[in-house]
Amino acid sequence: MEGWVSMPKVELHAHLNGSVRDSTLLELARVLGEKGVIVFSDVEHVILKNERSLTEVFRLFDLIHILTTDHKIITRITKEVIEDFASENVVYLELRTTPKKNDSIGMSKRSYLEAVLEGIKAVNTVDVAFRPHNADVSNVKRSSLINDTCNGSTRKKIYVRLLLSIDRRETTEAAMETVKLALEMRNLGVVGIDLSGNPIVGEWMTFFPALKFAREQGLYITLHCGEVPNPKEIRAMLDLLPQRIGHACCFEEEEWKRLKSLNIPVEICLTSNIRTNSVRSIEVHHFADLYNSKHPLVICTDDSGVFSTSVSKEYNLAASAFGLGRREIFQLARNAIEYIFADDEVKRELKEIFNSAELDQ
Ligand code: 5GP
């Protein structure tokens, strides 16, 4: 695994609350157990279980959300998740999360996002560059930029950008609130919108107005698309022309044709797809077809905590399952630079990082 860890990597599909360390979840569960909010022994095995159906995964997310409720914990998990990705040489991370409102603890979508931004600033094992080069910071508190280090520092650096997720359980109004928040927070590294959540819940037309508005306003869009068979929704999603989609597990021939003709990059999450049975086995995974037809794709983790994986493990799995060598995987990682939601200056700097690492491959 060490060989994959040292390679520079780009992670474009990682959910914050799905990427929390097991040790942190257990610690949080123990505290809530002591307070009598949950029964620790009931949740311990749920956290540590490895094989889960898609339905069980969404039940686990409900539990994780109980454990990570307050602002301080959101800040803590954001810091830890970024440090974990940086520790395995992820040089560019797009982290996505659903801004949550919880009146009982005074949490609004905005204060949730502010807690995430605090977490980015709290990272101390690596420098974090999270502000776009062209951001107008004249009206942003200087303290909010404290860990933004595009300043020639020689310390190890990770670029972080945020995607705000709309949960499929949300109303049109809630989805619109998330998009407006993303627009307001553009100067602080929010670059786009994701649609996620249980794929058998919610109707496309509920989210469409907010997604269309986001697109019109120039936010990048990525959609969880085709996790379950739903040709009508897949068609509507592709018609929106998102800049990327995630998963694409249940596409039929017509849908593949359209996706390929549009050349929309696909975020591939191998372990997640297999564990949740969205794809029957790694042998029949659509990675092979997309790779062979040179369709743009990027290997991602989805939920490194929930699926006990890491970007290095996903690269290793792709290499062994599809007979790819180090050079091919390196090339895939480098290609991903073209699909990131960041400006040309970031792309240029990332290409430099990959160019200098290429000599070691
Ligand atoms: P959060 O947005 O709370 O930081 O991250 C967890 C959330 O991401 C889950 O509640 C769910 O809405 C979304 N999510 C994580 N993994 C998946 C996945 O594989 N498929 C879909 N559709 N949504 C996911």
Image: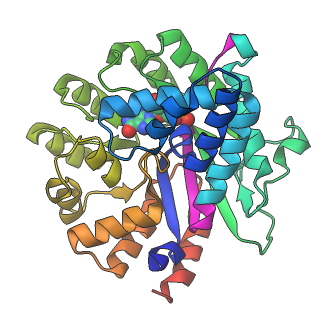
Residue range highlighted in magenta: 85-103
Q: Does residue 331 lie above or below 59 as drawn?
A: below
Q: In which quarter of the image is residue 93?
A: bottom right
Residue at 44%, 53% in the rendered image: 308
The image position of residue 33, as x and y in percent, is: 64, 28
Assign the C terminus to one quadrant of the image: bottom left
Q: Does residue 347 lie above or below 234 as drawn?
A: below
Horizontal side of 322 relative to 24 (left or right) equals left
The image position of residue 173, as x and y in percent, is: 53, 10
Front-most of residues 255 and 283:
283
Q: Does residue 331 lie above or below 102 as drawn?
A: below
- Number of dots carrying numbers: 0
Q: In which quarter of the image is residue 284?
A: bottom left
Q: Is residue 183 magenta?
A: no
Assign the N terminus to one quadrant of the image: bottom left
Residue at 84%, 42% in the rendered image: 144
Q: In which quarter of the image is residue 109?
A: top right
Horizontal side of 207 relative to 79 (left or right) equals left
Horizontal side of 118 relative to 313 (left or right) equals right
Horizontal side of 187 relative to 194 (left or right) equals right
Residue at 89%, 38% in the rendered image: 141
The image position of residue 182, as x and y in percent, is: 62, 30
